Image (spheres, grey):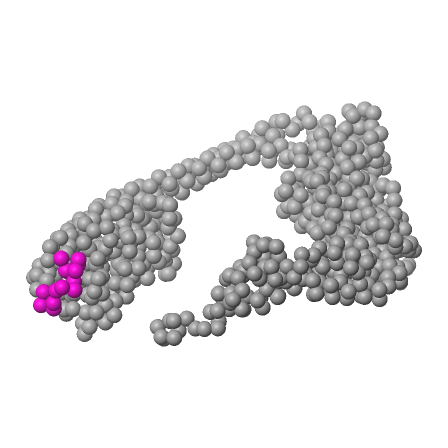
Amino acid sequence: MEKDEKMMQRPPRAHAPSHAKKRVSFPNIELMMNNRFAAALRKAAHSGGKRVAQSNRKPFLYKMFVSYLITVFIPVAVISVMYYYHLSKEKKEEFEKYALTDLQYLMSQTRMVVDNIDNLAVQFSMNPNLNEKLMNPFVYDIYDFQQLKETIRNQISTNRLIYSLYVFFKLNDKVLTTGEGFYRRAEFYDKAFIDGIASRGPAANPNDYEVRRLHRNMDPEVDVISFAKPLPLTSKDALGYLVVNVKKDVFFEILGKMAGADLSNVYIVRGDTGETVYESQPGAIRASIGGIPASSASGSRVVTDERGEQHLVTYVKSRFNSWIYVMDAPYSAYQQGMDVKKWEVLRIALLVTILGLIASYMLSLRMYRPWKRIVRENEQIKLAMEQNKPIVKHRLIYMLLNDHVVDTELIRTQLLQAGLYFAYEYFAVLIVVPNYQEEKDSQLSLMVFSIVENALPELVWAAGTMLEHGQLGFILNIGRADFDQDLKTKMTEHFNGINAMLQTELGISVQFAVGGCHFHYAGISQSYLEAKRVIACKALINKNDIVFMQEMEADTRLEYPLHIQKELAGHLIAANAELAESTVDAFFKQYIYSRYDSRERLLETILMLLSNTIHELYQQGYDTTIGMNLLDISKCPNNEELHRFISRYVHMLATRLGDQLDKTGDNVYVAKAVEYIESHFHSVISIADIADYVGLSSSYLSRIFKMETGKPPLEYLTRLRIARSKELLAVSRYSLQEISGLVGYQDAHSFIRFFKKYEGITPGEYRKKLLKNKSPLPDEQTGV
């Protein structure tokens, strides 16, 4: 049973530092361990008696009374809370209903005002004179545009809602205003707004209006709402834009009159940008609209403003543009009604609780009397059974682990008599392997067992015993059929805490191996065998690691690392101990330290890797006899020791081969091979031709050539041919076919393929690049 709310208590750290390093003060350390272990045994032996004594201090009558009282109090509390929640929700829905009705009406009136402005914009955009100038503005002079300006100006002169109106002609990049005249767009005072409209293009939403502050020449700044329409309406592509700027204060004044409502508690914002369109109290809108969900069309919530006052905020999102209408109502009106309901609910609940208290006491008193005598007679029997539990507990656990159980029902009864009650039907076995820095001590092992046994119940039901070779075994009672990731994470964290405690108090690290989950008592021995399989691979486990059998069986597919064998053999033949050890480090990083699950296969793979490498060296005539036995791998207690063992083994092997290697002759062969390649690169030659010339086998020549030059012979030949071809490409009189023949390729296609592989571009592209660098382009000469 998991107890996440508890924190694991560490034992006192008396003399812990001196014991963790060296046992210098031996008598003091022995005294510390004896005292601690004796205290642990006393705690285990008398835990049952303490529980019985505590039960004696809590009368049976009191327990019955509490149980009956709970059966009354909990239903009353739950029903009261649910009823109050229902009333609160109903009251909020009432407030929200009235607010949504007002906001919907306000939104429809806004639509009517906007439609009137849109109709005016459409009327202007349908002007034939305007559309003709949009199509071809270059054939008209300033007088024609002046007439168009006067026509538009006369139509809006009597409308106090419109602040300004102008037309942007896209073809000649000019703006015609109703007040000032003609502008180049670069000189226009509202150039930024026109640039924004043009950049959005067809993606712009025609129903979105931008609220902004406009500064027109010498006039003071004015808050306006800008409407932009592409022109002409019948064209697929816009040839210009009609921009209508209406006064913001006049707009909302008209809106308020049409809606017949007070807008003092109404706010309007743009949902896409968060820009404030209208607010009655500047700054308060931020507290009202913050956190409105994007997917919700309407709703309400409680917010707190900057003064600490609460408000009930209701919002509606417009269906035809990105505006959000928000209504802010005082929360106090809602709260007053709910306070009255709350006290009514509390009075009723208190009355029912008092009546239940009286009834519970009377019922528990009546039920207790017949059991009083029986309870007193059984207390002595229980106390005797509790005191004998530690004597047989360890033996019962050992029998379960090793499958020495004949009668399951009998062992269940014996476990109960020993104080071991397993609440769940699934079991797993934990094996703990201490890694002692010095020689194993029996009293120290008992101390480790005591610490682990006292810490485990904070995570799961557990019972343990001592095993062979200083190992500890624990039966874990799991409430599920398998280890899921959440349980494995909690167990790992808990085991890490136990490990940290042992390292702090005793200077000992431990390895944890957990078998699989199995059903009923019969599965305990199977889980124990699985945990032992994990421990058999301890050479691949960290010295303080936690390994689950479930992880080891997760992936048994492991490809043999042939490339690592070849690389390791090559470094050993070259007598390069540093690179050989680097290959070992890479192998451990990729397969061991990355927690590769198939640890059993990994042990076989490591032995095969080293054996095959030694066999390959032996076949090539090398003496691989050294003073280390490869089979000692199984004696390594953890993966760090295994890493050090294999690194020492490889280093000694490289040193042994280095004594046998004579590089003087190899250097002469490589020099002759390089001389042959440089004098015959223009011919079709192969590795066999080079090997025949120097008098070696092809494989041996390739190996010593790469060791000396860093590249195989054919790669060296190819790079030499590419270098010569680059010199010939600089001469324009040679074609690609001629160059390919001059550097040793039978056809231009092979030459192009190898050139692009090593240079990243084709020979033709390389030649163009050379020509471009020699003479500037025409644009560079003319300065264009």
Q: How many marks?
A: 0
Out of 360 and 165, give the one closest to the viewer.
165
Residue 309's spot in the image, x, y percent?
A: 36, 56
Main secondary structure of the magenta stretch: helix
Camera sees residue 591: yes
Relative height, residue 720 to residue 432 (above, below): below
144 in magenta? yes
Could you tell me which quadrant the N terminus lies in?
Answer: top right
Residue 88's spot in the image, x, y percent?
A: 38, 42
- Is 619 situated left or right of 171 in this image? right
Give the quadrant of residue 462: top right
Relative height, residue 57 to residue 372 (above, below): below
Out of 61 and 175, give the one closest to the viewer.
175
The residue positioned 82% from the left and 63% from the top of the image is 666
Give the quadrant of residue 716: bottom right
Residue 37's spot in the image, x, y percent?
A: 84, 49
The residue positioned 81% from the left and 57% from the top of the image is 696
Out of 351 and 759, give the one closest to the viewer.
759
Relative height, residue 377 to residue 133 (above, below): above
- Is 440 situated left or right of 141 in this image? right
The residue positioned 74% from the left and 48% from the top of the image is 562
> Which residue range is magenta in the image?
132-146
- Is 312 situated left or right of 680 in this image? left
Camera sees residue 17: no
Out of 532 and 360, give the one closest to the viewer.
532
229 in magenta? no
Residue 72's spot in the image, x, y percent?
A: 52, 33
- Is 427 situated left or right of 100 in this image? right
Could you tell me which quadrant the C terminus lies in?
Answer: bottom left
The residue positioned 57% from the left and 30% from the top of the image is 362
